[in-house]
Image: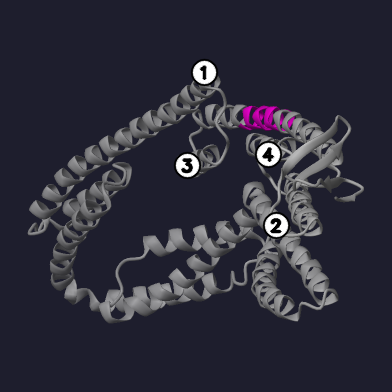
Amino acid sequence: MSSDPWGRVDETGTVYVRTSEGEQVVGSWQAGTPEEALAYFERKYEGLVVEIGLLERRVRTTDLSAKDAQTAIDHLRTQVDEHHAVGDLDALRVRLDKLVASVDSRREERKVQKAKQADEARTAKDALVTEAEQLAQSDQWRSAGERLRALVDIWKGLPRLDRKSDDELWHRFSHARSAFSKRRKAHFAALDAQREDARKAKEKLVAEAESLSKSTDWGPTAARYRELMDSWKAAGRAQREAEDDLWNRFRGAQDVFFAARGEVFAERDAEQVENLKLKEELAVEAERILPVTDLKAARAAFRSVNERWEAIGHVPRDARPKVEGRMHAVERAIQEAEEGEWRRTNPEARARAAGLTGQLQAAVDKLRGEIDAARAAGNNSKADKLSRELEGRQALLDQALKGLEEFGG
């Protein structure tokens, strides 16, 4: 008979294991020596030790589900309880009991975590619904529409709640989007209607302008063309394609009339030469307004010059582009000064520029920190990649800062 602290083999070849409940039969061994029998079943014990160790590690370090973990524990417990190994089986049962407790603990932790995630998802979806309902009342059609589409993507990335809660929140969210779409559709339908009305009104103006283009009643016809131009401006804009086509016809009709009148007035060249001289003098006076340092004074001075300019008759046709170009250059300079003043005093544009600059500065600072961290960790490849990204962000930041200077800092 052969034995060790945890088992023995009797004269008949029966192998036993010692447990807290007494000796239990492991099996029968007839193929070799008792020592070989004990060694064989001790190896089976060592196999169980390894399997339990692996399971302990999986429970501790992976996201093994509680159900799968319990199934594995039950399988190992069956092998231990069947006593087909020689070793400290009681110690293995204790380890399996501890594993059960650990799995139960993790199950509760996951339950709490799942409840927390559900609360966070509910809070997030409540916030999305609230924002969507606010956006539904917005008249910023483009930006609000883009934000609503972004909210849908955010919603899709959130976990589902219980069916009733999720359906209720989605109904409110969807209703807000539908309400916004309905208002936007109504707005653009009204805008289309206005443009259609403008098109019809301008069709009539064009028809009259074309009917007058052959007139030789120079004074009244010219006056009527000015009235038609005032009506044109008051009619509003039609759809772009229609607007461009109608304007070309309207302006073409006027050009025909005024070209014919100009030919009739060819004998007045002497007067037109004098008019050119007067307009050149006014152009010089207008050019003295530049550069614009006092916008209000510049507008008043140019208005005075322009009124006198309008009171002067025609100039020779070949001289007209040059002298009018000089006046237009002054007018454009004043308009650019007005636009610059508007940009400098527009708080919404300043706020957007400042916000963009802040975001870009934060991105640059973050990238610099990541580059330093990568180099400190010896990851030069990552640092180089981040450095190239930093160059692009820095260029955008420099451009944004330059734009912000236009608003006075």
Mark closer to the chain start, 2 or 4: 4
- Between the C-alphas of marks 4 and 1, the distance is 32 Å
Q: Is residue 408 visible?
A: no
Disc nearer the start of the sequence (3/4):
4
Proximity of marks 3 and 4: CB atoms separated by less than 8 Å: no
Residue assigned mark 2: 359
Residue 69 is tagged as 4
- Per the rendering, the mark at residue 164 is 1
Residue type pointed to by label 2: Gln
Cα distance, mark 3 to mark 2? 22 Å
Numbered range of the magenta stretch: 112-124
Q: Residues within 10 Å of mark 1 (few under 14, many from 20)?
A: few
Q: Point out the frontmost of discs 1 and 2.
A: 1
Is the Cβ of the residue at disc 3 closer than 8 Å to that at disc 2? no
SS assignment at label 3: helix
Frontmost residue, 222 versus 180: 180
Of the two numbered discs 3 and 2 on the same chain, state the one appearing first in sequence. Answer: 3
Answer with the quarter of the image where residue 293 lies: bottom right
